[in-house]
Image (cartoon, rainbow, N blue to C red):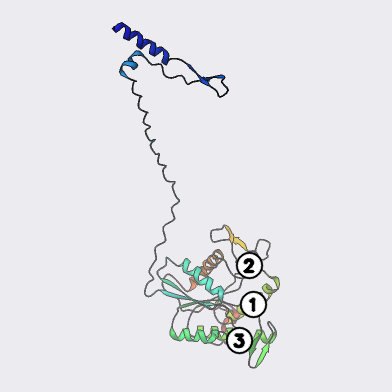
């Protein structure tokens, strides 16, 4: 009996291993259909069931590789703010918009000098012609009375090529009447400073990009030079120091470190930051006669000292 059962099981196993089956079509033709070859089953599978499928492999997550942050360029630490001494020398910068830029450059130049403080007294669009807009002679008298400064630096004139009205007359720019009235106003300005025993550095004007305008500014600088000499001021001529190698106007030139840099702004009139810093350096050399690290010499510079004209009778 056991042998019969074993034979029947083997027969069933043979039928299960058949590789093909027949299907009947609607027309009655037989079509041979290929079937997928199943897994070969053993007698053990028939008696005890199929072997359980192996579990799917578990994929381990790949570790995330963290990229090191890119190094960034560190900014230089800010310069420490130096507190000015209570008795620091007060350097006032008077003039037009050129004076405003110059005062900022002087602030940078003397930032670490606790014995000198820069006072910006520049007034944009001002000059010695339009005293109806801003009267510099009245302003300097007020500042002297207030004793608001110890040392004066003046740079002015880029707005002065225009008609000047004085004593009921109007003079065209740079005519004889204009020149006389213009120089008289500067003389009065410097006389007030000299009487108050305030040292003065008068800065001449630089070349300009437009030829006609530059020529007019050159004539104004010449009048200022004569007034400075007669008024006992130190005159700083900067014209040649801001020319190109060809002797003409140039927007570029050597900076305080000798490197070629932009010296002027796009308008061809004002200084760039590098140009203002260069001018501040020149002024620092000029005021050595008056400022020596915390003290100001009240001796007024006399351009005629050592000449035959020194003994001439001159107004105080």
Q: Closest to the observer: 167 or 64? A: 64
Q: Closest to the observer: 47 or 100? A: 47
Name the residue: 31% across, 16% down: 47
Q: Is residue 47 above or below residue 58?
A: above
Q: Closest to the observer: 240 or 217? A: 217
* Mark linked to residue 240: 2
Circle 2 — which element?
helix
Spatial distance from mark 3 to mark 2, Cα to Cα?
Answer: 27 Å
Crowdedness near tag 2: few (<14), some (14–19) or many (≥20) residues, C-alpha within 10 Å: few
Residue 142, given in percent of the width and then of the height, sits at: 48, 86
Q: Is residue 72 above or below residue 254?
A: above
Dot 1 corresponds to which residue?
A: 222
Name the residue: 66% across, 61% down: 245
Q: Quadrant of the N terminus?
A: top left
Hey, which residue is sitting farthest bottom in the picture? 168
Residue 254, given in percent of the width and then of the height, sits at: 58, 60
Spatial distance from mark 3 to mark 1, Cα to Cα?
Answer: 14 Å
Residue 280, given in percent of the width and then of the height, sits at: 52, 68
Location of residue 7 by image quarter: top left
Dot 3 corresponds to which residue?
A: 184
Circle 1 — which element?
helix
């Amino acid at each position: 009996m056991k042998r019969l059962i074993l034979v029947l099981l083997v027969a069933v196993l043979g039928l299960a291993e058949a590789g093909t089956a027949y299907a009947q079509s609607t027309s009655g033709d037989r079509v041979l259909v290929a079937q997928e070859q199943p897994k070969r089953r053993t007698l053990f599978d028939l008696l005890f069931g199929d072997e359980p499928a192996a579990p799917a492999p578990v994929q381990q997550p790949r570790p995330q590789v963290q990229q090191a942050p890119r190094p960034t360029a560190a900014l230089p630490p800010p310069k420490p703010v130096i507190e000015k001494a209570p008795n620091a020398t007060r350097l006032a910068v008077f003039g037009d918009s050129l004076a405003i830029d110059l005062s900022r450059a002087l602030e940078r130049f003397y930032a670490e000098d606790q014995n000198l403080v820069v006072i910006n007294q520049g007034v944009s669009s001002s000059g010695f012609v339009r005293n109806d807009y801003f009267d510099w002679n009245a302003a300097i008298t007020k500042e002297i009375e207030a004793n608001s400064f110890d040392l004066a630096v003046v740079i002015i004139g880029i707005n002065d090529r225009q008609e000047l009205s004085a004593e009921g007359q109007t003079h065209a720019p740079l005519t004889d009447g204009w020149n006389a009235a213009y120089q008289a106003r500067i003389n009065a300005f410097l006389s007030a400073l000299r009487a108050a025993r305030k040292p003065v550095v008068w800065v001449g004007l630089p070349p300009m990009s437009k030829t006609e305008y530059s020529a007019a500014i050159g004539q104004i600088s010449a009048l200022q030079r004569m007034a400075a000499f007669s008024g006992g001021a130190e005159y700083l001529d900067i014209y040649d120091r801001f020319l190109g190698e060809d002797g003409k106007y140039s927007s570029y030139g050597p900076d305080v470190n000798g490197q070629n840099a932009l010296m002027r702004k796009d308008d061809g009139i004002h200084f760039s930051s590098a140009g203002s810093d260069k001018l501040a350096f020149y002024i620092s050399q000029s005021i050595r006669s008056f400022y020596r690290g915390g003290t100001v010499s009240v001796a007024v510079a006399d351009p005629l000292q050592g000449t035959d004209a020194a003994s001439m009778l001159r107004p105080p």
